[in-house]
Each structure stands twice: as structure tokens, then as C-alpha cells.
């Protein structure tokens, strides 16, 4: 759906990528077509909670890194918020 209908956003794509890299995940993908939508992650039994925590932690860490890069770029361009 992401490629056929161009209905995803960068954050959803990143979540899917992070989820697919987890050791107990069988698969992950975008679902829904609400220009962003949601993801479905198929996780090995007994590993749901830890997998969720890992995905969330990596996603939030990536957001912090993105924000740092954005601020550095803004400062280089003289755009102080």
C-alpha cells in the first residue's frame, strides 16, 4: 500500500523498519489508508511486551536524534526558534 497508493508517512515507515529488525518479529506492515495509518506487527508468543518496549524505545530515540539534527541545521542557517 505504501508504494502503490503513497499513503504512508516517514514515521510509519520507520516504525515498520524498526519492528522488522526485532528478533522475535515475524513481520510488520502498514495497515489502513489514512495517510499514515497504523502498523500490524506479528510477534512470537511470549515476547509481545518486550518487543513493544524495544520498538518504542528505538523509535523515540530516533526522534531525539532527528530533533538534534534539525536544530543543528536551523542554527547553521540562522533560524533560531
Image: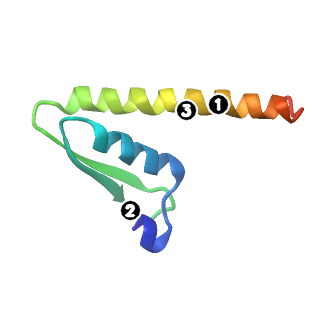
Q: Identify the image quadrant of the C terminus.
A: top right
Q: Which residue is mark 2?
A: 32
The answer to whether residue 29 is left or right of residue 75 is left
Residue at 11%, 30% (x, y): give it: 46
Residue at 39%, 52% (x, y): give it: 38
Using the image, tell me which numbered label, if any, was put on residue 67.
1
Q: CA distance from mark 3 to mark 1?
A: 6 Å
Is the residue under label 1 in contact with that under label 3 (CB below 8 Å)?
yes
The answer to whether residue 7 is left or right of residue 55 is right
- Residue 31 point in image, percent of width and height: 35, 59
Q: Is residue 21 above or below residue 3?
A: above
Q: CA distance from mark 2 to mark 1?
A: 28 Å
- Residue 73 point in image, percent of width and height: 76, 34
Q: Identify the image quadrant of the N terminus.
A: bottom left
Q: Given the current orientation, which residue lies at the most extreme right position?
A: 78
The reply to whether residue 81 is visible in this rendering is no
**Mark closer to the observer (2, 1):** 1
Mark 3 falls on what kind of element?
helix
**Mark closer to the observer (3, 2):** 3
Q: Given the current orientation, which residue lies at the most extreme bottom position?
A: 4
Which image quadrant for residue 52?
top left
The reply to whether residue 3 is visible in this rendering is yes
Q: Which residue is mark 3?
A: 63
Amino acid at each position: 500500500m505504501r508504494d502503490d497508493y503513497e499513503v504512508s508517512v516517514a514515521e510509519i515507515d520507520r516504525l515498520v523498519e524498526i519492528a522488522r529488525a526485532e528478533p522475535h518479529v515475524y513481520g510488520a506492515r502498514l495497515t489502513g489508508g489514512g495517510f499514515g495509518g497504523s502498523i500490524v506487527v506479528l510477534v512470537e508468543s511470549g515476547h509481545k511486551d518486550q518487543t513493544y518496549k524495544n520498538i518504542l524505545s528505538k523509535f523515540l530515540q530516533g526522534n531525539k536524534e532527528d530533533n538534534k539534527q534539525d536544530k543543528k541545521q536551523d542554527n547553521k542557517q540562522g533560524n533560531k526558534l
